[in-house]
Amino acid sequence: MITVQRCEVRVVRRGGWSWGPDPQGLVRQVLDSLPDLLTEHFGEALTGDGPDLEITEPVRLTARLGSSPGLVIEPATGSLPAPRPVSSPAAPEPTSGTDDPLPPGPATLFEELAVRDELAPLLALLPDETFRTFLTALREEPSLTVVTALVTEGTRRWSLTPPPAGDMAGLTAALSAVPGTPPAPPDPVRATPAAAPGAAAPVAALVAGETRAGPALPFLLAGPLARTGYLDAIGPALAAETPLFAAALAYKVLSAPERGWRRPPQDHAAAAAFAGLPEAPDLTEFAGRVEPALPVLDGVLALSLCRGHDPADPLLVTGVDGGLLLVDAQGMFPIGWAPDVAGLLPHWTACGRPPVLVCDGPLPASCLRDLATAGADVLTDARPLRGDPLSRLPWRSPLWTHGTPAPALAAAFPGHAERAAELVRSLFVDRLAVPRARAGPLERSTALAASLALGLIAWTLWRDRETPHPVLALTRFADLEATVRYEPRVVRVRLPLGPRHADLWRNGLLTDVPHVVWLGGRSLTFSGG
């Protein structure tokens, strides 16, 4: 008989943004195969009447789920550790929620992106400051694949001299030549990209056994964000300050601040509960510290949406916060924000160069001209400026066009524009995570994440009966209450039984979310009652 004292299963998606109809079934499939796998590897130790044996080192098995129904299991690194005799099986020691290992570092995230061929596109999206920040962190956890991608991107930006392929020493030296990068310390420690040295103290988590009641909507965001891979990126990008980001994310789906800044006490309590904190934190200083790390999260979100976009479906462009917001019109999923058209073109190209609908509003002066120059088929209700290569479309309302957008887009344009305006007003303007601070990057990043999660909820529940829209989920679940209990290794969210609970459960939106990084690695589970 083999007794497994502790088993952890981690499922990593290698492309696409959907986990399929039964994500938990992937874990069950692996667990069901474990008895045969362990017997195959340790069969010799099970024969005869010898002493009991114990394996003291971690046993890592990699299960690859392909198109075939079976699994291919192999050791992750080298040979499996040999068992040693013991007098009796050791009992598992009591554990607490604070004993979980540290979240994976940036190297883990970037290696997974490299496997999906998404590391180079992500690096190309990062501003110079963010690139240097993560370059310093990744230099302390070198990986040939990641370092090669960093050098390639650095060569594109600053004309570095690339070393021979596979020369780790030469690649590392090339990274040190990136302008503005500090020299490597003689005894490096693991970096925390989101925080400046000494700027933040460890965040205290809620004790096990504490129970709170409050809005359920923030907790409903975790499942959709996990399925897109966004949740996996938060830990490596933000290190120990993930609870503060979670609190900011919760504020995006709670009530809008009164007079633009004042929140009711229950909203502070709800944000703290979602973040796993005893009380709501002050996010003012965090908003400034986290700014260099946010483009990584925004890039992961954008890449996940671009992968699933149909080139036949249009994209929307609307003015937000002095720049431009790019939105997938089917479902109103916000893809990304940029100060100008040049920052949106990589996303537009990754989506397959679809038609672009530009909504009238506070647009940069060269917006229409830049889109036309890039070769986009443009349809807009914004009056062109002198020199913009657009022509008036014979239509019942004033519309202008460039290229050959489908005529049906003109009929659909008013509805798309109205939903986009509602999205911007509800999640980018009215609801602020840090009302009294100029926290544009944090406000936009949390609005993008909240809109994506709400959009996925709306798309899953209502796409067959009405036009899905993130604001639908925001308004229909705003008053759904939940009771939250914190245990050493799990956070349990209990929703009241009723039509909303039934809809969420039937559509797989109440599946467990394992290893939530801002909850100390605890799993998030949902139930009704």
Image: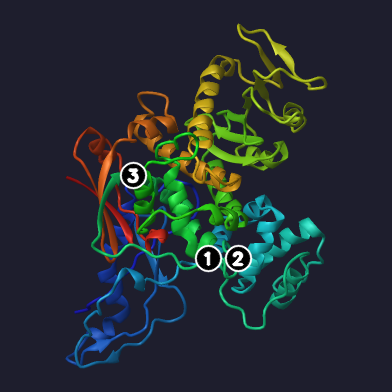
Q: Quadrant of residue 486?
A: bottom left
Q: Secondary structure at mark 3?
A: helix
Q: Which residue type carries mark 1?
A: Ala
Image location (x, y in percent) of residue 504: 29, 39
Q: Secondary structure at mark 1?
A: loop
**Residue that badge 2 annotates:** 196
Q: Are marks 2 and 1 in contact (CB under 8 Å)?
A: yes
How many labels, in total? 3
Q: Quadrant of the C terminus?
A: top left
Image location (x, y in percent) of residue 346: 67, 42
Using a 10 Å C-alpha cutoff, classify the residue at mark 1 as few (fewer than 14 neighbours), some (14 to 19) or many (20 or more): some
Q: Which mark is residue 200?
A: 1
Q: Is residue 93 left or right of residue 80?
A: left
Q: Quadrant of the N terminus?
A: bottom left
Q: Is residue 20 visible?
A: no
- Tell which circle, 1 or 3, labels the residue nearer the N-terminal end: 1
- Tell which circle, 2 or 3, labels the residue nearer the N-terminal end: 2
Q: Which residue type carries mark 2?
A: Ala
**Residue that badge 3 annotates:** 266
Q: Quadrant of residue 521?
A: bottom left
Q: Kindly identify the residue that appears in the image at 44 percent across and 35 percent down.
A: 258
Q: Which mark is residue 32?
A: none
Q: Which residue type carries mark 3?
A: Gln
Q: Is residue 357 visible?
A: yes
Q: Are marks 2 and 3 in contact (CB under 8 Å)?
A: no
Q: Kindly identify the residue that appears in the image at 77 percent across and 61 percent down.
A: 155
Q: Is residue 92 left or right of residue 357?
A: left
